[in-house]
Amino acid sequence: MSTYSAPGRVNLIGEHTDYTGGLVLPMAIEFETRATIKSTDDGLLHLTARNFNETASYDLAAYPMKGRHHWSDYPVGVIGLLRQRGVPVTGLQLELEGDVPPNAGLSSSASVEVATAIAVLQNAKVAIPPAEIATLCQAAENNFVGGACGIMDQFVSVNGTAGHALLLDCRSLEYELLELPESISVVICNSMVKHEVAHGEYGDRRGEVEAGQSALVSVVPHIKQLRDATLDDLESARASMSPESFARCRHIITENARVLEAREALQTGDIARFGQLMYAAHASFRDDFAASCHEVDVLVELARDLPGCFGARITGGGFGGCTVNLVAHAHAAAFKESLIARYQEKTGIVAECYVSRASDGAIARLR
Ligand code: GLA
């Protein structure tokens, strides 16, 4: 039996930009999924989810082609694609357990997929390039589980590095690690409003974005993806798209620009500037992308008034989930306490807050 782990993530800035070839700036967090693995020769896949105290078995000779809306879809989808890629599996016992809060926008699913992939690859003594591990996990989620996610979550869960945020170009999959200052704490606050990528609104927004992108591509010849567009390009295609698509695309174009500015802010140690970009990103997500919710907006506004807070915004797919807050280390504990108390006063909901350091991704954990 050997155990491998893969982290969840929090996105600092760059939201809903990944599936149109854009820029994102997430970091891996300390919450993780652990996968304990052992080979068997019985031609079966024995899966255990320690968190639910449940098991599931699959016959490798009659492998399913589609998920069945069950926790086992994530490992089954990943193992299916690894086998298609030639990774030998004669039978496995795989136990999963973890502490990434589910449905909070912290990528619990990506951490399950990546932990599974790393465990199976290590167990079979097969190496594939890290970027391909991420795209394989994303493909399992897109095609087997049925969640229309982009590449961000799986990529940072594989490639994250302690103490650093990861700036990913989602078109080329080139990335750059940006050191985070020691004096800053990343406080994640869970609104406790449910978030689920596999259902509903995420897909609706993605549809609106992709419709806008298609309109842009047909009106402006040099544009291949939304990533290539300026606000002027968008304006020139306004008549070819719905007002909703126009607003969603405006969020994405301005968000890609904010990620680049955020990178510069980190490189020059200008955390105040970084924080202002987070507030601007939140406003764009709320107004143009229309994917925030009342409770999350309350959390961001409350954070703004608290001592030591540089910036706050929603993080992840939207419609609930968590905010991410950059807070001076010395203020972090008091910030957390006040935010929980004030949020409860305003909404009646008891939020959960976690202070996390940027952690290693699954590959760095192997060393
Ligand atoms: C979810 C998806 C990601 C990304 C974000 C929004 O977390 O899994 O691929 O699209 O939403 O930035």
Image (spheres, rainbow, N blue to C red):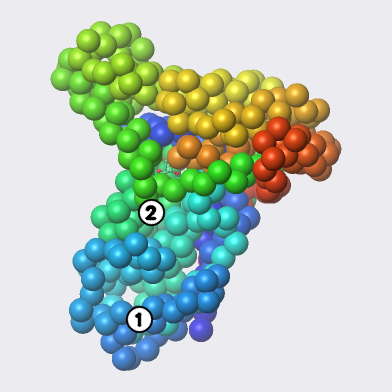
From what the image shows, is residue 187 above or below residue 47? above
Residue 134: numbered disc: 2
From what the image shows, is residue 66 above or below residue 54? above
From what the image shows, is residue 190 above or below residue 68? above
> 364 and 78: which one is in front?
78
For the point 20% across and 21% down, the residue is 215
Residue type for callout 1? Ser
Quadrant housing residue 209 = top left
Which residue is label 1 attached to?
57
Q: Position of residue 271 (x, y in %)?
A: 68, 26
Tag 2 near tag 1, CB within 8 Å? no
For the point 53% across and 32% down, the residue is 293
The crowding category of the residue bearing disc 2, from other C-alpha atoms within 10 Å (few below 14, some 14 to 19, many at least 20), is many
Under tag 2, what secondary structure? helix
Q: Determine the residue located farthest toward the front in the rendered image.
A: 348
* Cβ at disc 2 under 8 Å from ligand 1: no
Q: Earlier in the sequence, mark 2 or mark 1?
A: 1
Residue type for callout 2? Ala
Quadrant housing residue 322 = top right
Q: Which of the two marks, 2 or 1, is nearer to us in this view?
A: 1
Q: Position of residue 104 (x, y in %)?
A: 54, 48
> 130 and 100: which one is in front?
100
For the point 57% across and 30% down, the residue is 294
How many angstroms separate mark 2 from mark 1 (CA)? 25 Å
For the point 57% across and 55% down, the residue is 101
> Is there any visible trace of residue 21 in the rendered image?
no
Q: Quadrant of ligand 1?
A: top left
Q: Horizontally, is 169 left or right of 192 in the view?
A: left
Q: Position of residue 84 (x, y in %)?
A: 22, 68
Q: Determine the residue located farthest toward the bottom in the rendered image.
A: 42
Q: Position of residue 86 (x, y in %)?
A: 24, 71
